[in-house]
Amino acid sequence: MHPACYCAGRARPRALLLPLDPYGHGLLHALPPDACRARGHGKRKSWNFIHEKMSYDTFFTMKRLIERSRSVGEVLRWVTQNPGKVSASHYPIALHKLGQLLQQQQGPAALNGESRRPGPVLEQPEFQTLCQAIISGCSKFDNFSIVNCLYAAAALGLPGESPLVRVLEDESRNRLGRFNQKDVSMVFSSVMRLHPSSPHPLVESCLSSLERHLEKERHPQTLFLLLSYYRLRAQALQGHPASDQQLINNRKILRLVRHTLGQVSAMREHELALLDEMLALCAQEANNKALEAIFSSQLFYENRQERFIRSMAEWLPRKAENLTPYTMALIAKYVARHRLREPRLLDTIANFLLKRGEQLDSKVIQKLVFPFSRMNYRPSNHSELFPKLEAILEQKAGSSPLATVNILMSMFQLSHFPQSVLHQVFSPAFITNVMSSPYALIVRRYLSLLDAAVELEFRDYSGPRLDPRYRVLMFEHALTADEANRKYSYKGLVAEALRQLVGEECYRQDEVLPPGYCTDFLLWINRSGTVLPLSRVPAARTCRTLPPLLRSPPAAPRQRAARTTWRGASCPRSARPRGGPATSPPRTITAP
């Protein structure tokens, strides 16, 4: 802050700086109306939100000195050697700055979320003086200072049994009824971080307030700590028979998950794993509206939740009749995107389609059929489903030409060739309807692809074909490797084929081999052509960690006295990491 500029005898209004803002909502939750108002012309300003009457310059000068400190000792000296210039609001600033400096000293370990402890800082006399000053004046602090001191102490990594933490927790418990929503949220987050493995009475006290006002909670840390708390409660109830407490806890988790998906824009890996676990635990209590909200979330759609889908396959058949076509289409879209091959779930979609197919629009049918063709899965009721789809397409072929062609392509991939529908699709009336539509180009491309599929797959077909004048190339020109990887990548299709043929444990995708060779797919194959599991071959792990020139030849598996081969398809030049080799790697590395 710059000193006030005086013009014509009047002081220009000053901007208010907030000392600490851990939640992004501003440090001072509520200022009195006269907090920034001068008490008379020519007098120095006093600040009513500070317990001790202190001038503007004194308060913000000390704040700047603390924030600009470059070492732990410097922070402690400013606070302990100037007791007359330190207010209650300076203490959380000092604790917060100490946490930042310790995090910088510890480096990547602290940034990766590992627990950190202040260590030698606790033994310094200046730090003990700081803690004692907070303890002695704690009862006179305002709510802001109490809450933020506790939050900063948790971020600093102080042990939960330290005297400073106990005093702040006791004072927070006494004032809990006077805290607002943000204060309660910060207290809950602090106590959960200070006592991660053992229940604390203050957590239960904060929980009732947070549950009542859950829709107002916006901070991701609090939301995920709430999920962690509910997980602990679910684990405690897991050994008991089904009860009302488990049902209530699952419904609370479901409500929290829906709110979290609506508020959080990004998650880290451990948060995604926690969300997946909680979804698998509670989603069986979800109705159609809740499932629609979950699968409509963009954050959920972009991330693969395998445990949830695996558990969903168990209970979805019982609820399928109560779901709307829109919700079922969202589920099918998600399963197809992430190639989650769950037979029971896919059969449930097929049964839904068989029962309600006549009532559905072609655009919805194409979404429900797509997972089958994408994962090359013929549902158990295909003998009934495919003739039913063929009859529906005969009636609705012209209502949505693009959807009709997509459904036909899916059926072709599953080796079902509806001859009567092909007659209709290649008829002059259908082609004329397509040519007058705004999506004529894309439909012509798909019709050309369908015509080629008929030529290759359905040799017995004797009906009309696509007129040569309407045939177009699916791709306008030959694709380079880079463009193919960028726009029309088939790696997902190859990965699904490998998963079905050899299993997930027998290949790895997008591996980088020393000294920097990129591979699309990596397999361990012996000379007889058998694909071996990568995790069970010790030499596989050695080959991935040592440079080729320094690595000893990998030993062949004990059960087979044969030469073993590493095979990896090299990536295009543009996909190589910077600093990698300029020449292409050998596609086969053979161990003698």
Image: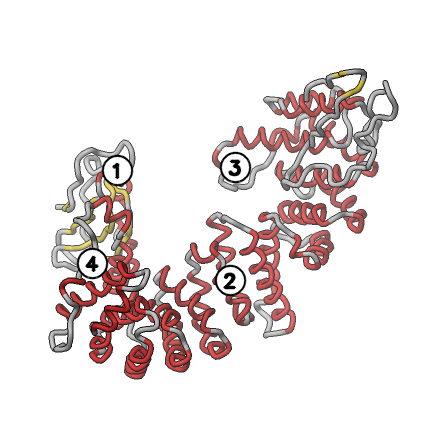
Instruction: Give me the disc on residue 294.
Output: 2
Q: Quadrant of the N terminus?
A: top right
Up-down relation of residue 412 to residue 575 (above or below): below
Q: Position of residue 326 (x, y in %)?
A: 46, 69
Please identify the quarter of the rendering in which residue 229 is found: bottom right
Dot 1: what SS?
A: loop
Which of label 1 and label 2 is nearer to you? Answer: 2
How far across and how far down the image is residue 34, in percent? 83, 33
Q: Residues within 10 Å of mark 1 (few under 14, many from 20)?
A: some
Gap in Å between the C-alphas at discs 2 and 3? 33 Å
- Residue shown at the point (59%, 31%) measured from the top left: 100
Q: State the image coordinates of residue 345 (x, y, percent, origin top left).
A: 40, 72
Between the C-alphas of marks 1 and 2, the distance is 40 Å
Q: Marks 2 and 3: CB-CB under 8 Å? A: no
- Give the mark nearer the N terminus: 4 vs 1: 1
Frontmost residue, 508 versus 570: 570
Q: Which mark is residue 110?
A: 3
Report the residue at 28% width, 69% height from top. 433
Q: Secondary structure at mark 4?
A: strand
What's the CA distance linking mark 4 and mark 2? 39 Å
* Residue type (three-letter) at the residue carrying disc 4: Val
Q: CA distance from mark 4 to mark 1?
A: 24 Å
The residue tagged 1 is 516
Q: Is residue 539 visible?
A: no
Of the residues shown, which amino acid type is indicated by label 3? Ala
Q: Quick one: label 4 or label 2, which is nearer the N terminus? A: 2
Is the C-beta separation of discs 4 and 2 under 8 Å? no
> Tag 1: residue type?
Gly
Whichever of labels 1 and 2 marks the residue nearer the N terminus, that label is 2
Disc 4 target residue: 531
Q: Point out the frontmost of discs 4 and 2.
A: 2
Q: Can residue 303 be seen in this snapshot?
A: yes
